[in-house]
Amino acid sequence: MYTLNGTFTQETNFYGDNDVFNLVEQYGSPLYVYNENILRTRCREMKNLVSYENFVPHYSIKANTNIHLLKIVREEGLHADVMSPGEIFLALESGYTSDELFFIPNNVTKEDMLYAIERGVTTSVDSLAQLKLYGQLNAGGKVAIRFNTGIGAGHHEKVVTAGKKTKFGVSPDTIDEVKKLLETYNLTLVGINQHIGSLFMDATPYIQSLESILSIAREFDDLEFIDLGGGFGIPYHKQDGENRLDIQALGQKLDEVLHAFAASYGKKVQFQIEPGRYIVCESSAVLGHVTSMKSNGATNYLGCDIGFNIIQRPIMYDSHHDIELYAQTEKSSDLSPYTVVGNICESGDILAKDRLLPTAETGDLIALLDAGAYGYSMASCYNQRFRPAEVLIEANGHTRLIRKRDTFEDLIRNML
Ligand SMILES: *Cc1c(COP(=O)(O)O)cnc(C)c1O
């Protein structure tokens, strides 16, 4: 096998001793491949981010909910953030216990809340109306609140989750009303949380946002934890030499702030963060077949079997994924611009526009890198394409199937 473009999978020994052609033959194409070593490395970086003792990173499982990956993340000592009853269910199935979960939903129904309450999962509410509902369902209980401190950040408008233009969080202007509701329902506010947005590569807004959330924390005496949010970015443009987020510098700044807060608050309150992407993203590549090369007008197309049902990020957020190509025989690695498209019947089914790539041919393989976060978890069977299998390259180099590919039966499973 010859890698025609890029060095990431070679440098990281991503596929172990496995030949990618064998992998897709054995497990089907397209195929999500995960690397256990990379996943564990990222978990450890988050776990060791600060020296502050009472620090617990929570993996935001919406990024990827495969229970075999969740087991690994749990082994590494991370707790989990969940957004829905389905995510609570999957986390519990993977071996997490209720006290290791934090439920951070948005606009949930009474049934959703009850699902968490009945399982003893600490819940954060994100509006006064939801606080009231929670109080009615669990008077005398413990609750957390997500605040919107007005500072947002992120790589795309759709992933900025704080600030005046987003639907998330309780405004700090309403703290008096919050206090009244807590009193009415005899609720103890045990935690506050925020999440300013996703994929920051510069930690400045994250650090700046801390002062606001900590000043809200000072309004409440019984806090057990403060959750600072996720959004830690990863370098999607590795092939262009993009730098990693400097987590050492981030950790140092964070550490200072946490220690200073604990000293002024009078107790070593638990601090949490909630990275999703950072944990799983780089541990996966999605493999597919090059199915046709053609030109329409001035545009050269590289067609493949990875449609936007397999990975939605490029069409949803205009996201960039580095692309590697693999061939069975050596060929030229000269680059020309290609628009990379999938097999879904929509003209928007574009994975990359005018990307400089070597000239591939039918039968070669294509890999989209950094596909582990919001990849499979957003996959669908649109066009009645099967959702792909997921395979793990274990630390010992062996492959393990961790999710089967869909079958025709899956397409009619719920149809009456
Ligand atoms: C999605 C989400 C996260 C994780 O975001 P990443 O960008 O994947 O780190 C964390 N917290 C909340 C509340 C979220 O909605």
Image (spheres, grey):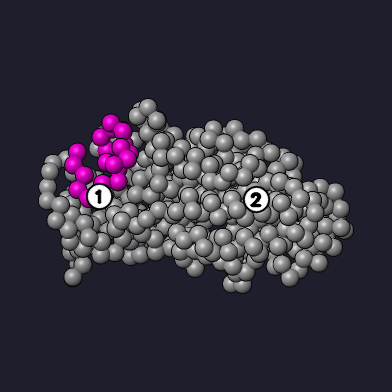
Which of the image's four quarters has the N terminus? top left
Q: Residue furthest bottom?
A: 164
Q: Position of residue 249 (x, y in %)?
A: 49, 53
Q: Nearer the viewer, mark 2 or mark 1?
A: 2
What segment carries the magenta color?
1-20
Q: Residue at x 52, y 63 (%)?
A: 204
Q: Inspect this view and state whether residue 75 appears.
A: yes
Of 169 and 250, the residue lying toward us: 250
Q: Residue at x 50, y 34 (%)?
A: 72
User: Is residue 8 rendered magenta in the image?
Assistant: yes
Q: CA distance from mark 2 to mark 1?
A: 42 Å
Secondary structure of the residue carrying numbered label 1: loop
Whether 364 is drawn above or below 163: the answer is above
* In the displayed structure image, the side of residue 106 where residue 395 appears, left or right: left
Of 30 and 121, the residue lying toward us: 121
* Residue that numbered label 1 is attached to: 6
- Which kind of residue does numbered mark 1 sit on? Gly
